[in-house]
Amino acid sequence: MQGQGSRSFRGCRMIGRLPRLLAVLLLAALPVLSSCYVPDQFRAEIRIARNGDFSLDYKGVLTWAPLYKEIVAGRYSQAEAQEKIEMIRRDLKRDDQFTSIRSIGRGQFDVTYHRTGNFVANPGMVSFVRRNARILNIDARPDGTVTVFAETPNIDKARPLAEAGLLVRGSLRVISNMRVTGTPNATATYKDPDGEWTVYDWILDGTAPAYPEIVFQR
């Protein structure tokens, strides 16, 4: 997975040149995302095995939308903005499954996340970033049903985000040797070289009409 470095985002530079009132109006159009993180320039991978072992990896950018909104609207001095950015960074750091967290400004962070576990021993829901700010989810039920789904912005929600300078660009890969129930809405599906595992890929760029979702049965 490739890191993003410290470069600024084209969308963020664009919004900085907009008249203040227009910027505020665009950002006010994001109520649905006012309490969550927005992912960008990321690669995510989820592996799930029949024995219940799983891993969840994310490498890319996370933007805390409420803070981004306030900073772009000019409601904080530089010192105040830095203080609030540090508060968000410390909050993320409480989760030791983040192996790297680096601020790149305006409430945006370049992060690396890695989590492992076993759903046979501990069935339930696992969510990234967390249960009250969900982007990637694995829901394992006691009956052996495992649902993987992403709550990234779809085509209806991505447009106002882009107008406000927040782009959603990334990929999700799910790898499993479990049986699929129903028809997954993956962009591409193929077997790995040994033929035991199946790979499901999604390209997430805000143009899809539905969230990525796939259901397995152990």
Image (spheres, grey):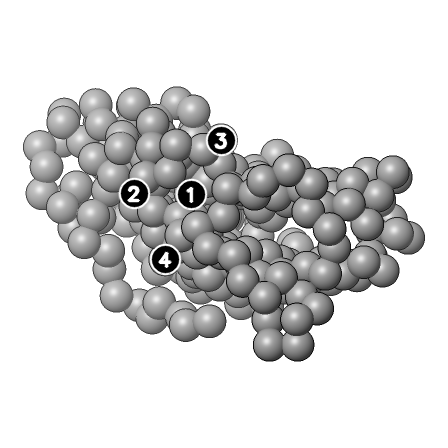
Q: Report whether residue 26 is seen.
A: yes
Circle 4 residue: 41
Q: In whole angstroms, how far apart are the C-alphas of marks 4 and 1?
A: 10 Å
Residue 171 in picture, x, y percent from top left: 44, 56
Horizontal relation, residue 68 to residue 217: left or right: left
What residue lies at 33% left-to-right and 55% top-to-bottom?
Answer: 105
Residue at 60% across / 76% down in the picture? Answer: 193
Q: In this view, does 177 lie to the left or right of 23?
A: right
Element on which disc 4 rests: strand
Please tell me whether mark 2 sits on a helix, a strand or a loop: loop
Label 1 environment density (alpha carbons within 10 Å; few <14, some 14–19, many ≥20): many
Asked if 175 appears above or below 158 in the picture, the reply is below
Q: How many marks?
A: 4
How much space separates mark 4 and mark 3, taking CA atoms? 20 Å
Mark 1 touches mark 2? (CB < 8 Å): yes
Q: Residue at x 34, y 27 (%)?
A: 156
Label 1, label 3: how far apart the Cα atoms are: 10 Å
Location of residue 61 with respect to 25 vertically, above or below: below
Callout 4 amino acid: Gln
The Cα–Cα distance between marks 2 and 4, rounded to whole angstroms, is: 11 Å
Place of residue 89 in the rendered image (x, y in percent of width and height, measured from the top left): 51, 54
Q: Is residue 22 above or below residue 119?
A: above
Could you say which is closer to the camera, residue 109 or residue 3? Answer: 3
State which mark lies toward you, 1 or 3: 1
What residue sits right under mark 2 in the picture?
Answer: 166
